[in-house]
Image: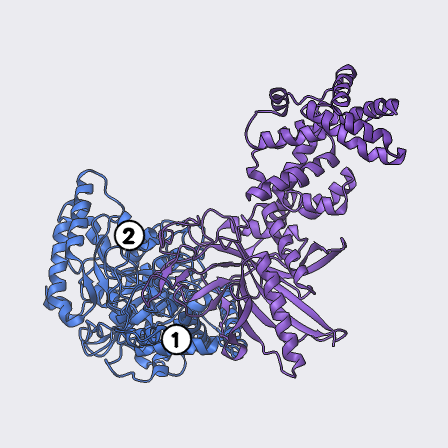
Chain colours: A blue, B purple
Amino acid sequence: MHDKTLTELAAGLQAGEFSSRELTQALLARIKRLDGELNSLITVTPEQALESADNADAARARGDAARLNGLPLAIKDLFCTEGVKTSAGSRMLDNFIAPFDATVVEKLKAAGTVSLGKTNLDEFAMGSSNENSFYGPVKNPWDTGAVPGGSSGGSAAAVAAGLVPAAMGTDTGGSIRQPAAFCGITGLKPTYGRVSRYGIIAYASSLDQAGPMARTAEDCAHLLGAIAGHDLRDSTSVARGVPDYTAELGAPLTGLKIGLPKEYFGDGLDPEVESAVREAVKVYESLGATVREVSLPHTHYAIPAYYVIAPAEASSNLSRYDGVRFGHRCDNPADLIDLYKRSRAEGFGEEVKRRILIGTHTLSEGFFDAYYKKAQQVRRLIRQDFLDAFEEVDVLMGPTSPTPAFDLGANKDPVSMYLQDIYTIAVNLAGIPGISVPAGFVGKRPAEGRPIGLQILGTHFAESRLLNVAHQFQQATDWHRRRPAIAEEAR
Amino acid sequence: MQWETVIGLEVHVQLATRSKIFSGASTAFGAAPNSQACAVDLGMPGVLPVLNETAVAMAVQFGLGIHAEIPEVSVFDRKNYFYPDLPKGYQTSQMYHPIVGPGEVEITLEDGTIKRIRVHHAHLEEDAGKSLHEDFHGMTGVDLNRAGTPLLEIVSEPDMRSAKEAAAYLKAIHSIVTYLGISDGNMAEGSMRCDVNVSVRPVGQETYGTRAEIKNVNSFRFVERAIAFEVERQIELLEDGGKVVQETRLFDPERDETRSMRTKEEANDYRYFPCPDLLPVVLDQAYVDHLRDNLPELPADKRARFEADFGLSAYDAGVLSASREMAEYFERVKNACGDAKQAANWVQGELSGALNREGRRIQDSPVAAETLGELIRRVMDDTINGKAAKQVFQALWNGEGESADAVIEAKGLKQVTDTGAIEAMIDQVIADSPAQVAQYRDAEPDKRGKMIGYFVGQVMKASRGTANPQQVNKVLKDKLDALC
């Protein structure tokens, strides 16, 4: 059961081939067997999972099955889940049991899904390798010497290893798409405002967006339909109807206009990644699409702009972790300042501290105009680049990441780590949707190689189109069907 | 050297919304600590603010009430600082694009002239919680019930030149917000408090002196006292060759002095930036027009109308329009009795005296406005005399009757105007007072006027106050003079 897609599992449940309880038990057993090494889950919740599975089975027996009834999944440990530890991958929140559900969690429950647990991540979603977690790094199921990407590395690894058919991620600068690429799965970052942020622990509020990570675009379409929509509790969520994202999956791609941003094929791009992406584009041509080169001239400003805006917002968003009301508090504080200093010094990891300091600095009097204000101006230019490009083409394509998954511990320098997100970060700054789909492997034998992701970008609220374009690729290729050895052996 | 005082006020008005500015928790005062703080108020991980539309409407109403510009777009910013009663580590406020632009407030000076105080802007923000330092044995308690309560901060230009003007401005703001019903104006419960910026400069100098900011003054009286102290302190300092430092000071009402809290060098860098969780507030013209059309009559307009339409003096019109409740009561009395001047005299005289004696508010007056109007009508139509009217008022105040007529009837206070009855009482008094009659007769004619008072008093006493005093006077004089 573990290598089936969500759509296939839904059919199996519907046909009575297995129950949600059986499915849940099988996956919990896999988690027990495999996750000791992978470390993709911070918290596993077997009792709650089995209870939800039983409820789903009972609902189905009553003829009252919800849209994703009885389907198991995992949730990034950045989403508040009532009564369950919600750590954000940080020592700071190691003792935090959320008193409420995030809107996404609430919607997934209402859709009948069964959560098996909370996935590992870079602390407060800050990172591109999942090495910044208080709970230790996650290992890439394709090669346990490699990182799974980040920050939603736990979600990506759990799906790739067949521990769950799908997981929820969040993407602030590439945190869904890059780990999806590194782990050979499909990950969608929706348009900013498409999915409610309520109850998702904030990293950078103007960039954070939740989305599905699964084996196929079709699965992502089902999941997005369940979690998208306006939320009165999130003022930045958009009041706009939610279409049936599966409706256009089968539409032919004849006449589709694809743009290849020339800036996404420049220095630093691994040649094997480049050739895989160019091969994928050829597949699209064979499906009737036309291809042209386009330019996103402000691309090289995206990383600096992001590393002003995101840390600025983070420095403010993370001020609430002060040891006063919840979270980590140091022992025996001498006074208030000591309480703040030691609670935060002990509770936060290095990368989080680095970003808080950067953000505090760029917002300071005398620096605000030069950094924050300028970065916001750049952000508008980057957004305009995309809007101009989408006047000419329907979608943009390129690599999700310049390299495949790198070795654990290989990227010690923060700036070279930041450069990992060169193709994904501008998308968040512009607020547009993007999807990463498996498009090949680096390394001779696919079973031991490292996956490559193709990134497809569309204009605001073009999720249906992106899912259609991704799905048609997956009808024509089988990269998304490859499984890592760890998943096969444990069968 | 002659010194001039320059004062600017930042007034924080708590808006009378039922729920908080960014959450659904109640704003009611006096609940058990932390019982009115929801996940949003507690700054829990993952929570988001949602702007309370009523708070926006109230802020715009205030802006319209002071004839201010209402910008189409306003933006919430985060003011970042750490404090235990500030749950998120930032206060959501409006730094760069406030909801209310420049406006002005009229105050009446002691000599009756009107001065306009310019308002620089007013912005919306959330209140912090309260730190409680008592009862915790060396620790500090935090009550977050108040966290997230909507505040309108009204920032004046440095247009005031005395403590009295500052107090008058604060009263004018109080009166506008209570008229609009956007705040209960209860200063004791902290619904209105202000920061006072004070500086002094030699008369004639154009540039402002260095100012001190006195934080959190919460009564009209304290504003005057704090300024008086601060002005004296600054002048003394300057005359001794010292310098005023820019700093934040605290007013201690117990000792009647201000003390330094922190200097400019110690000031926080609040790292303001636009709050990414809230969209800019965009007000369309129709919305603003609708609020403008439904604005109640405000104190300045009411005062002008009382003067022009009712012929009241500027002073009376000012007193009677000072609060919405006072003005409404007065107008109801006036409508019931039909005479604005009589109504004004009674409301400011008998009624205000009684209210002050018992520390009651006019809306809690035991004598209804219509009842007082009826009483005044009975004086005007000579049913009772002025003295009896005071007795009737007291009885009504004490709850001794449903209506003025009922009290007049029950106490037999109806004025006696029957000449025969009055003559009989006078004859009796003259007969009972031979000594006084003899004195009267022996007195010089120009002294007799004063002496007649005794006889009037006796007759009024005999009539238990019901005789018409003018009539008694006239008949007595005729009868006594006939004896001379």
Hey, which residue is sitting farthest top in the picture? Answer: B420
Tell me the subunit letter for badge 2.
A
- The three-letter amino acid code for the residue at tag 2 is Leu
**CA distance for labels 1 and 2:** 32 Å
Give the mark nearer the N terminus: 1 vs 2: 2
- The three-letter amino acid code for the residue at tag 1 is Ile
Give the left or right position of residue B148, taking residue B138 as reference: right
Which quadrant of the rendered structure holds the N terminus of chain B? bottom right
Residue A115 placement (x, y as % from top left): 22, 55
Residue in the foreground of this view, choosing between B261 and B237: B237
Q: Which residue is mark 2?
A: A108
Q: Which residue is mark 1?
A: A356
Could you tell me which secondary element the residue under label 1 belongs to? helix
Could you tell me which secondary element the residue under label 2 belongs to? helix
Task: Between label 1 and label 2, give the one nearer the viewer.
Answer: 1
Which quadrant of the rendered structure holds the C terminus of chain B? top right
Q: Judge whether residue A420 can be spotted in this image.
A: no
Give the left or right position of residue B455, taking residue A460 as reference: right
Whether labels 1 and 2 belong to a single chain: the reply is yes
Tell me the subunit letter for badge 1.
A
Q: Residues within 10 Å of mark 2 (few under 14, many from 20)?
A: many
Q: Judge whether residue A71 can be spotted in this image.
A: yes
- Residue B52 has which mark? none
Vertical arrangement, residue A252 with respect to residue B440, above or below? below
Vertical arrangement, residue A436 with respect to residue B16, above or below? below
Give the left or right position of residue B269, taking residue A99 as reference: right
Q: Residue at x 54, y 52 (%)?
A: B56
Residue A178 falls in image quadrant: bottom left
